[in-house]
């Protein structure tokens, strides 16, 4: 098999695994219909729709984002097959521990299967919730400001408002600087570009 053929096979296999994980997790909640929510760029989610999003963890327990409504919520879309995602998560774990007593909650939304998410969490000792979002969450990422649906993608949500979004990996220093600024309740919303 040629190198190109192997790549196509691996991509097809990963897509099938992600689809299986999505089906096992029950798929995503419905997105808002046209005319609902904020319409700046296509379909977006309202505050209530964001907090009503729910996903199973790798053990099958259902968790809604609304359970962390009173926290500065760091939501990281990632996958085990995404090298930049795998590289940034150990720093996310470290920063999540540092900021836990400051009202910050990290949540990972894995575009992956429950088995892969569970194995990764155990290997990397990820102690914040890793939920199984599956490929069905790709339209949700788009509705949350990532129309390219690329990974990794990180949001910081405070009181239902997306205060920060970044497409591309973040290191510990960038996480700390952004969290410090947001915890200082600085004005405005920031968007970071990859790079």
Image: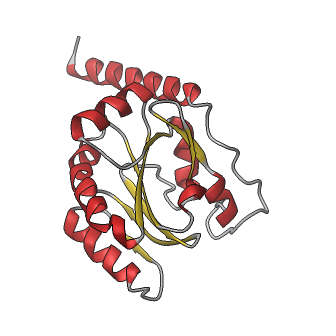
Quick check: can you spot residue 46? no
The C terminus - image quarter: bottom left
Quick check: can you spot residue 56? yes
In the displayed structure, does residue 3 sit left or right of residue 140? left
- 52 over 12 or under it: above or below: below
- 150 over 162 or under it: above or below: above
Which of the 4 quarters of the picture holds residue 179? bottom left
Which of the 4 quarters of the picture holds residue 164? bottom left
Q: 35 and 158: which one is in front?
A: 158
- 116 over 109 or under it: above or below: above
Which of the 4 quarters of the picture holds residue 160? bottom right
Work out which residue is located at the far top of the displayed protein and give it: 1
Residue drawn at (22%, 57%), measured in percent from left and top?
Answer: 94
Measured as percent of width and height from the top left, residue 133 is found at 51, 40
What kind of colouring is applied to the model shown?
secondary structure
Q: 27 and 64: which one is in front?
A: 64
Measured as percent of width and height from the top left, residue 106 is found at 39, 57
- 146 over 40 or under it: above or below: above
Residue drawn at (55%, 59%), measured in percent from left and top?
Answer: 144
The N terminus - image quarter: top left
In the displayed structure, does residue 176 sit left or right of residue 71? left
Measured as percent of width and height from the top left, residue 119 is found at 31, 29
């Amino acid at each position: 098999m040629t190198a190109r053929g192997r790549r196509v096979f691996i991509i097809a296999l990963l897509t099938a695994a992600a689809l299986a994980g999505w089906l096992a997790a029950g798929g995503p909640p419905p997105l808002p219909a046209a005319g609902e929510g904020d319409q700046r760029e296509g379909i977006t989610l309202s505050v209530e729709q964001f907090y009503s999003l729910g996903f199973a963890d790798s053990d099958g327990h259902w968790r809604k984002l609304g359970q962390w409504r009173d926290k500065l919520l760091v939501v990281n879309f990632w996958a085990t097959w995404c090298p930049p995602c795998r590289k940034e998560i150990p720093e996310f774990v470290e920063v999540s521990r540092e900021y836990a007593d400051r009202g910050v909650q990290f949540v990972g939304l894995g575009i992956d299967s429950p088995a892969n998410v569970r194995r990764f969490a155990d290997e990397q000792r990820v102690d914040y919730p890793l939920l199984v979002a599956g490929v069905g969450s790709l339209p949700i990422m788009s509705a949350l400001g990532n129309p390219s649906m690329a990974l990794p993608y990180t949001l910081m949500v405070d009181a239902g408002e997306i205060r920060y979004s970044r497409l591309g990996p973040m290191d510990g220093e960038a996480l700390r600087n952004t969290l410090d600024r947001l915890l200082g309740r600085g004005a405005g919303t920031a968007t970071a570009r990859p790079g």
